[in-house]
Image (spheres, helix red, strand yellow):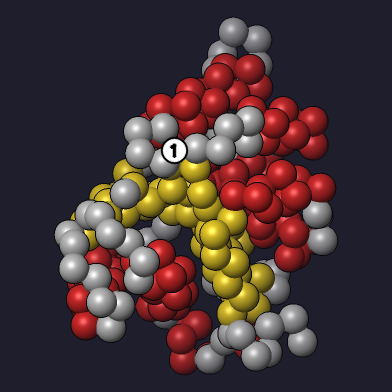
């Protein structure tokens, strides 16, 4: 199982929400997802110049709709997310953005890992987290997986540059659409993804949205 992860929003003072989202291709079908993103880079580029990377927040509404139409044309992936309402997070957690990121990611991965029956490969954008924290994230998740989540398989982590990784760009698309749904009540594009969501986590559970 390959889990591609990206985020939208920030863990600073700007905005009310922060989202981490993932896309999980079914078996080898990441090939189609990568092809969709690659073709979008070419289509949305200027003149003969393809985009190096899809940044969803920079796309026009018709471009987002075009991309989602093609991405969601086949039922060959699932996706999940955790969205944090930042004003209700513990201030001590927010003091260290990497600690906060790891903590929120554990809530998302926990739901997925608990039901996994195969080895897991987690692929993250290497701009999401400081280099010094890469190993601590992997160790933190592995400890939880083997001691609390009952996972028996192998779990590995990779940190890739999203500019050269189309599946990570697909995760960016999902994170941006989810962020727009909670921050600006943009429901139209979110509706495309609803049939594909396995886990939708609103955190903290009791205070979210208040």
Measuring 79% from the left and 36% from the top, which residue is drawn there? 61
Give how far across and how far down residue 168 sits, in percent.
Answer: 44, 42
Q: Nearer the viewer, residue 54 or 132?
A: 54
Measuring 67% from the left and 35% from the top, which residue is drawn there? 68
Q: Name the quadrant containing residue 203.
A: bottom right
Measuring 53% from the left and 91% from the top, which residue is drawn there? 90
Q: Name the quadrant containing residue 131.
A: bottom left
Is residue 82 found left or right of 127 in the rendered image? right
Q: Is residue 123 visible?
A: no
Is residue 44 found left or right of 167 in the rendered image? right
The number of discs equals: 1
Q: Name the quadrant containing residue 62.
A: top right
Q: Residues within 10 Å of mark 1 (few under 14, many from 20)?
A: many
Q: Is residue 190 above or below residue 146?
A: above
Is residue 204 found left or right of 183 in the rendered image? left
| Quarter of the image where the C terminus is located | bottom right
Is residue 40 found left or right of 121 in the rendered image? right
Give how far across and how far down residue 162 sits, in percent.
Answer: 42, 40
Task: Return the residue found at the far top.
Answer: 48
Residue beneath label 1, please? 167
Q: Is residue 11 above or below residue 181?
A: below
Measuring 28% from the left and 83% from the top, which residue is drawn there? 148
Q: Mark 1 falls on what kind of element?
A: helix
Give how far across and how far down residue 183 sits, in percent.
Answer: 75, 64
């Amino acid at each position: 199982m390959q889990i591609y992860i990206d985020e939208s929003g920030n863990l600073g003072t700007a905005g009310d929400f922060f989202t981490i989202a993932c896309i999980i291709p079914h078996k080898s079908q990441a090939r189609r997802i990568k092809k969709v993103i690659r073709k979008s880079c070419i289509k949305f580029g200027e003149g003969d110049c393809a985009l190096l990377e899809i940044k969803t927040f920079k796309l026009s509404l018709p471009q987002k709709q075009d991309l989602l139409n093609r991405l969601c044309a086949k039922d060959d992936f699932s996706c999940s997310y955790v969205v944090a309402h930042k004003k209700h997070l513990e201030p001590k957690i927010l003091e260290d953005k990497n600690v906060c990121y790891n903590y929120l990611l554990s809530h998302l991965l926990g739901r997925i890992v608990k039901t996994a029956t195969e080895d897991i490969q987690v692929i993250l954008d290497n701009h999401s987290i400081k280099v010094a924290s890469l190993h601590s994230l992997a160790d933190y998740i592995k400890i939880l997986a083997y001691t609390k989540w009952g996972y028996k398989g192998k779990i590995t982590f990779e940190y890739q540059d999203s500019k050269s990784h189309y599946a990570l760009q697909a995760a960016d698309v999902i994170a941006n659409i989810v962020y727009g749904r909670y921050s600006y009540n943009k429901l139209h594009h979110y509706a495309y993804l609803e049939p594909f969501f396995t886990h939708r986590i609103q955190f903290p559970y009791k205070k979210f949205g208040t």
